[in-house]
Image (spheres, rainbow, N blue to C red):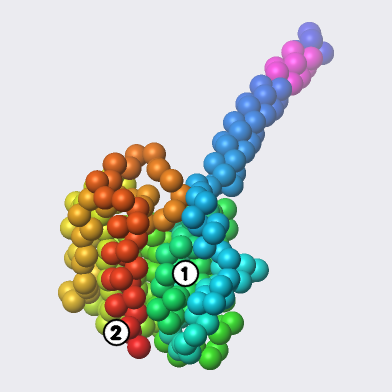
Amino acid sequence: MTFDKMNLDGIKDWIKYSRRRQVLLVVAVVLLLILSGFFVWALTPLGPMDEALEALESDGYVKVRTDRWLIFEPVESEFDTGFVIYPGARVDPRSYAPTARDIAEEGFLVVIAPMRLNLAVFSPNAASDVIDSFPEIDTWVVGGHSLGGVMAARYADRNEVHGLVLWASYPADDLSDSNIPVISIYGSNDGLTTVEDIEDSKEDLPPDTRYVEIEGGNHAQFGWYGDQRGDNEASISREEQQEITVNETVEFLRRAI
């Protein structure tokens, strides 16, 4: 009788153990599938368009290097101001090459910093390595598009820089008491970073922040990677939106000198 009871208790324990192992196995498989899906999503970024790839070629105006970072150096003028660009979430950094090139032509060093897993949250301090690699540059401005701008704002809040450029973006931290100059450029037709988002975030930026609303601009046209799910259709061309973005950014960089 005792022996049978011991056997029965042992069988029950074995069943419980087996069920626990099955549950753990199912959980592990589900987590693996979720992680696999995330990595596939993160490692298949948007862009670049053909125009972006063409902008990676050096010429008599801009020297382009594509080793660790995407570096754009003006050829015909000396420069002492650098601008570090944080790409948007899941956007190929090359998708900002035309913008970076146009800014560099105006006499600035421009560096696009690739992000781990194409998400700036995994490389929030990317600008530090760039800045340390160019000790001859006296003035540094950081900026970014969308999530890239969020993390650039965090970097600016925690490090000494001379300006912050936000393209279709806003800070996650309170910079309202900061002395850092800021420009916020956004599109009226943006479906991802809406005008309402920009308005709601104004209390987190310095009072003298310059705001530039691009009438008819949307989210994706701040880069060269095509359309983006969730965005609204722009009523102006990508070239028109880029021209405004570049001109306003260049003017801001000139004031940072």
Answer yes or no: do the residues labelled 2 and 1 have beta carbons within 8 Å?
no
- Callout 1 amino acid: Arg
- Callout 2 amino acid: Arg
Q: Is residue 147 above or below residue 183?
A: above
Q: Tell which circle, 2 or 1, labels the residue nearer the N-terminal end.
A: 1
Q: Residue furthest right?
A: 3
| Residue named by callout 2 | 255
Residue drawn at 42 percent across, 70 percent down: 102
Front position in the image: 179 or 68 = 68
Say left or right for 63 vs 206: right
Q: Quadrant of the C terminus?
A: bottom left
Q: Which residues are magenta?
A: 6-15
The CA span between labels 2 and 1 is 19 Å
CA neighbours of label 1 inside 10 A, class few (<14), some (14 to 19), many (20+): many
Q: Is residue 85 above or below residue 35?
A: below
Q: State the image coordinates of residue 121 (x, y, percent, origin top left).
A: 48, 58
Residue drawn at 35 percent across, 56 percent down: 239
Q: Is residue 148 magenta?
A: no
